[in-house]
């Protein structure tokens, strides 16, 4: 079942940190988008 909670954008250059945050926040019913850089973050925000 897809998450229907608030949306959050996770930005970090370390894959382990991104995965950990996504796991914790998804468990709390947040919709997570994960990117690895500031540039990717700006791209995600404009979508």
Image: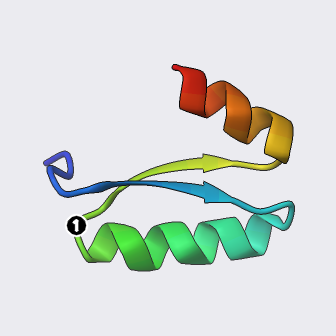
28 vs 10: above or below: below
| x and y percentages locating residue 18 in the rendered image | 67, 66
Q: Residue furthest top?
A: 47
In the shown orientation, is residue 33 left or right of residue 31? right
28 vs 6: above or below: below
42 vs 31: above or below: above
| x and y percentages locating residue 26 in the rendered image | 34, 67
| x and y percentages locating residue 8 in the rendered image | 43, 56
Tell me, what colour scheme is on the image? Answer: rainbow
Tell me where residue 43 sits by quadrant. top right
Tell me where residue 27 sits by quadrant. bottom left
In the shown orientation, is residue 15 left or right of residue 2? right
36 vs 13: above or below: above
Tell me where residue 38 sits by quadrant. top right
- Residue located at (55% from left, 74% from top): 21
Q: Nearer the viewer, residue 43 or 22?
A: 43
Q: Nearer the viewer, residue 46 or 26?
A: 46
| x and y percentages locating residue 11 in the rendered image | 69, 57
In the shown orientation, is residue 46 left or right of residue 23? right
- Residue located at (18% from left, 57% from top): 5
- Residue located at (71% from left, 33% from top): 42
In the shown orientation, is residue 13 left or right of residue 11? right
- Count how many numbered circles sit on residues in the image: 1
Q: Nearer the viewer, residue 16 or 25?
A: 25
Local SS, label 1: loop
- Residue located at (19% from left, 45% from top): 2
Residue named by callout 1? 29
How many C-alpha atoms fall within 10 Å of the one at disc 1: few (<14), some, or many (≥20)?
A: some
């Amino acid at each position: 079942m897809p998450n229907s909670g608030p949306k959050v954008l996770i930005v970090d250059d370390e894959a382990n940190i991104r995965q950990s945050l996504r796991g914790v926040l998804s468990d709390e019913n947040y919709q997570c988008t994960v990117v690895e850089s500031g540039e990717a973050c700006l791209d995600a925000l404009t979508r």
